[in-house]
Amino acid sequence: MKTMRFFQAAILAMFVLNAFTAFGQKEKTVEVGGAPMYPSKNIVENAVNSKDHTTLVAAVQAAGLVETLQTAGPFTVFAPTNAAFEKLPAGTVETLVKPENKETLTNILTYHVVSGKLGSKEIADAIKKGNGKASFKTVSGGELTAWMKGKDLYISDENGNQSKVTIGDVFQSNGVIHVIDTVVLPKS
C-alpha cells in the first residue's frame, strides 16, 4: 500500500513538474511591427498582428489569399511593409484592391511568395552556389533574384527593382517571412 502511494505521489510530482516546465517555456519569437511572431502560428495569424503590415494584410484579404496562406505550405513570403507600399505611385494600392483588379493584385502578391521554407541560411547557400546570385521561382510563375550586399540580403524583381530584407527568418508554422522594404513587381 505504501509503495502504491509512493508511485502515485511520484507520478503526480512528475506531472506537476512537467506542467510547470511547459508553462514556463516560451516560444522564441521575433518582433515585427511591434508584435511577437510565434513559430507555432501560421503566416496569417502572425501577420494580422504586425502594425507594419496592415496594407499587406488588407491586400491579401482583397485578393482572397487568406485561406491559402493558412494552409500547411510551406511558403517563403517576402513581406513588404506599409512603408514599402507607400513607395508605389499614389493611388496604386487603392486601385489594386478594387474587385475588378483582383487578378492583378493576386499576381503581385503571389510574386512575393516562393514555395518551400527558405531561411536566410538556405538563401545564402543558394547565392554562394550561384556565384553571388540565386534565382527563385515565385508562386505566380515569375522569378526573384537574391544577392548579398555585405551582410545584407536583397532581392530583385524581373524589372530590376531591388528590395532589402530588413528582418529575416521570421519562422511560422507553415513557412518563413522575410520583411522587405520595397514592393517587388512581376515583369510588366
Image (cartoon, rainbow, N blue to C red):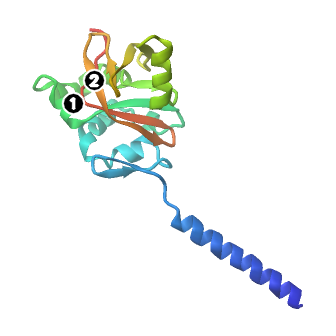
Is residue 63 shown left or right of residue 15?
left
- Give me the residue at 51% from left, 37% from top: 71
Q: Amino acid at mark 1?
A: Ala
10 Å crowding of disc 2: few (<14), some (14-19), many (20+): many
Indicate which disc, 1 or 2, sits on the residue closer to the N terminus: 1
**Which residue is disc 1 drawn over?**
84
Residue 180, picture quadrant? top left
Task: Indicate the quadrant containing the N terminus: top left, top right, bottom left or bottom right.
Answer: bottom right
- Give me the residue at 41% from left, 13% from top: 132
- Give me the residue at 49% from left, 59% from top: 26
On the image, the x and y values in percent for residue 51 come to 25, 47
On the image, the x and y values in percent for residue 83 come to 18, 34
Labels 1, 2: front one: 2
Residue 160, picture quadrant? top left
10 Å crowding of disc 1: few (<14), some (14-19), many (20+): some
On the image, the x and y values in percent for residue 124 come to 45, 24
